[in-house]
Amino acid sequence: MTVIDNQTASDESIAAGNGVLGQRMLRKEDPALLTGEAVYTNDMVVPGALYMAVLRSPHAHATITSIDTSAALALPGVHSVYTGADMADQWAAPMPCAWPVTDDMKNPAHYPLAVSKVAYVGDGVACVLAETDSIAHDAIELIDVDYDVHRAVIDLEAALSDDVVIHDELGTNASYTWPLLIEENDGDCQKAMDEAAYVVSERYVQQRLIPMAMEPRAVVALPQPFGGDMTLYSATQVPHILKVMTALTLGIPEHQLRVVCPAVGGGFGSKLDVYAEELLCVQLARTLKVPVRWNEERSENALATVHGRAQIQDIELAADADGKLTGMRVRLTADMGAYLQLVTPGIPLFGAFLYAGVYELPKAYDFSCTGVFTTMTPTDAYRGAGRPEATYAIEHAMDALARKVGIDPLELRRRNFIPKESYPYEAFTGLVYDSGDHDKAASIAEGLIDYAGMRARQTEQNTPGSTKRLGIGVSTYFEMCGLAPSRVLASLNYSAGGWESATVRVLPTSKIQVVTGTAPHGQGHETAWSMIAADRFGVDPADVDVLHSDTAIAPLGLDTYGSRSLPVGGVAITMACDKVIDKARKIAAHQMEANEEDLEFSGGTFRVAGSPDKEMPLAAIAFEAFTAHDLPDGLEPNLEAQVTYDPPNFSWPFGTHMCAVEIDTETGDVDLLQYVAVDDCGNKVNPLIVDGQVHGGVVQGIAQALYEEARYDDDGTLQSSTLAEYLVPAASDVPPITLGESITPSPSNPLGVKGVGEAGTIGAAPCVMNAVVDALSGLGVQDIQMPASPLNVWNAIQQAQANHQETNQ
Ligand code: MCN
C-alpha cells in the first residue's frame, strides 16, 4: 500500500497495533475505478437478457383512462409490454416504507407501476421488454395513454387545505404530524418566548435537491429457471435491506434471493431505497425465466430517483440579554413527494434532535413536523438526511440573533457552546452527546481564516458605494450518525436495527479475509477495513482482502448510510479481529507450552514475555489452526470469528466551518473566496479518506447554498431534469478548501472514532449562506432564499433598496 504523505496521526489519534491506523494511505479500490477495470451493473454482459424501459407519466396528477400498447407490441424486437393493471395481482405487498413514524401515519399503497392514477411526472405507467435497450426505448414512445388530468399539488402549505386530494383513499394530503415530546418539560417554551430579551422568528425554505450520483441506477435480474434462485444485481447502497424487502414485496423465499452490488458510483442516500425498477426486473425475470435488465438515463434519474431536503422550517429562538438561548420552537412542513419511499417520513425526524446544535438549551423546546404529500418525485434520504436542514436553521437563526443582539456571530456562538467539561453531555432530548470541544474547533477555524483580519478587511471594503461586498460566514454543527442503538431506533418506530456484522478469518497461508455487512459506494471501505485488520494483526494492509456487497458472501448486514460504516461496521471488524487473536493466542500458548497470560502479541508475532527466543508468527498459527493436528483440547479448527455489534450510542461528530464571499451587487454574483472546515470525527482510520469525504461533503453543501434546485412549474413538471438546468458545481466553481485538524475521540467505541461521511455537507450550506447575508445585511438584506443564485441575490438587493426608499418617503 502506498502512503502518500508520511504524516501519521497525532498523539491523540489511534496508536494501536503496527501504526497503520491514522496513515494517509491511497485507496486500494482506486486503480480499478480509475482505469475502467471496475464493473458497474450496466457494464455486465448478460447473454439472453431482455432490456426494460419504463414509460413515465408526463402529468403530475391524472387518472389513467386507457392504455393502448398494440403499436409498441408490434415493433420488431419487442418481447412484451406490461401495464400497472397487467401486473396488479403479482405483488405480495405494496412497495415498502420501513418507517411508520406515527401509528396513524397515512401511507398510500404504492406499486411499481401505477394502476389507475399517476401522482408525479415520472411515475411509471407501463414497461416494455425488448431485445435491445434502444428498441425498448423506441417502443415506450408508441404506447398510447389517455389521461384525465387533475390539478397538480405543488405548494407544500396549500396542499394541507387543498380540495384536490392526491390519494383519494386517504382523504387528505397530510401524512402525519410528529411532535418531539420531551419528558418532564420543565421549561415551558412559550414562557421562554414571553420572558426573552430577544426573540428571533425566521422562516427558511430548504429547496428540493436532486442527489445526482455519478452513476444513475441500474438493475440486472438473473434467474436460475430450474433451481428457482434469483440474483439481483443492483447499483444500490443497501443490498441486505433490499434482499429482505424484495423477498417480502414479491413473496420470494429469502434464501432463494441473492443481492449483489457490483461497483457502485455513488449514492448520497438516493440508493438507500427499494425501487420500482428493481422489483419489476426481478418479477419479470422470475415469470419469464430470462434475465431482465434496466439502466436509468440521466434525466430519468432526475425524475425517478428520490429527491432530498424539501422542507419549510419555521424556527423561533428565545434568548436572554446576553444572547444565551432560553427556548426554541420549530415547526416543519416536510414534502414527502407523491409516495412514501423506504424511509421518507423519518428523514425530518432526525433533525428534530439537532436543532439546538452545539449549544446549551434548557428543556424549553417545542418541535413538531407535518409530512405532506405533493405531486412531485418522492423525497427520501439525501446526504445528511434531516441533519443539514436542522443545522441550517439553527445556524442561520443564530446569525439573525447575533444581528439583533448586536454582537459578532462567532462571539454569540461561544457564549452558547456546551462547555468541553460537560461531556458526556445529556441534552434536553435525553440523548447523550459523547464528546466535544467546540471552542477548540472554532478557534482552529478562526485562526485558519484569520477571522479578525477578515473582519477588518470587511469594514474597509464594505463602504456605502462599494459594489463588491465582503461577507464572512460561520457555522458550527453537531451531527448524530452511526445510527444507532437498535433500542433507540425502536423508540422512533424505525423498522430495522442499528447493528453491523463482521467476519474475520485468517486463511491457511496467513492472508486475512474481512467480510463486512457494509456496502461502500465511494467511501473506501476496502482500504479502511484492511487498515483496521492490518493494524490489529500487525500485517501489511495489502495482505487483507475485504469482501462486501454480496448477500451470498456477507449474509448479515445493514449496509451503508447515516455515516455508520466506521463507527458500527469498522468497530465490529475490530472486535472480530480481537476474537481471532484471542483464539490464536490459545494455539500459540499450547504450541509454545506457555501460559496465555505470558504471551505478548505485536507485529504479527506472539512472544513469551521474558523468553525472547520463544515466538510464533501468525502464519505458523494459521497453518496449525488449518491442519488441526495439534490444537488445544476442545478448540475448533481454523481462525475465524464473527461479531455483530450494536452500538451503545450514536456517534457525535462536530465542527466549525468558516468562509468568505465577495458579492457583486450589480450582477448578484457570489464569489466564494475562501473556505475553511474543521470537522472533528474522533480518531481517524485514514485521514486521506476523511479529507476526501469532507471535501465532497463541503462541495455538496456549497451546491445547495449557491447552485442546485429542483424547480417545478405550476403543472408539476420538473424544469431542471438535465445537467444543463440542474447546476451541479464544477471543480472550477469551488475554491481550495483548507481543512483544520481537531481530534476528540469518542468514548463509545474501542477505536474512538465517529462518522464523517455527511459532516462536510452539514456544515457547509449555512456557512455559505451566513456569509452571503453577512455581505449584504448592511444594504438592508434580511435573508436570501437558497440557492443564492445571481438572480435571487440581485432581487434581494433590489427589494432591500425598494424597502429603504419606501421607509424614507
Ligand atoms: N473514516 C475514517 N475515520 C473516521 C471516520 C471515517 O477514516 N473517523 C473513513 C471510513 O473508514 C470510511 C469513510 O471515512 O472509509 C466514511 O466513513 P463513515 O463516516 O463511517 O461513512 P459511511 O462509510 O457509512 O458512508 C456513508 C456516508 C453517507 S451517509 C453518504 S450520503 C455519503 C458518504 O458517506 N455518500 C457518498 N460519502 C460518500 N462518498 C462518495 N464517494 N459517494 C457517496 O455516495
Image: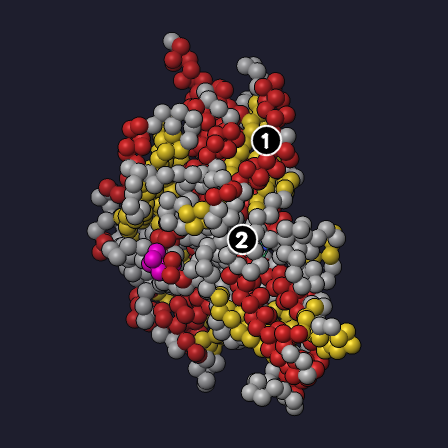
Residue 299 is at least partly visible in this image: no
Residue 332 is at least partly visible in this image: yes
How far apart are the two marked residues, 1 and 2, measured between alpha carbons? 31 Å
Residues 150 and 751: in front is 751
Residues 445 and 292: in front is 445
Q: Residue furthest right?
A: 613
Residues 185 and 30: in front is 185
- Residue 490: in magenta span: yes
Q: Residue furthest top?
A: 809
Q: Please give left or right for residue 16 compared with residue 51 in the image.
A: right
Q: Nearer the viewer, mark 1 or mark 2?
A: 2
**339 vs 222: above or below:** above
Secondary structure under badge 1? strand
Tag 2: Cα neighbours inside 10 Å, few (<14), some, or many (≥20)?
many
- Residue 74: in magenta span: no
Q: Which residues are magenta?
A: 489-494
For ligand 1, tell me if the residue under mark 1 lies within 8 Å.
no
User: Residue at (67%, 50%) from the top-left corner?
Assistant: 10
User: Residue at (48%, 56%) from the top-left corner?
Assistant: 482
- The residue type indicated by label 2 comes to Ser
Quarter of image, ligand 1: bottom right
Q: Which residue is mark 2?
A: 746
Q: Please give left or right for residue 608 compared with residue 421 in the image.
A: right
**604 vs 205: above or below:** below
Tell me the tag on residue 660. 1
Q: Residue furthest front?
A: 610
- The residue type indicated by label 1 comes to Ala
Pointer 1 or 2: first along the chain: 1
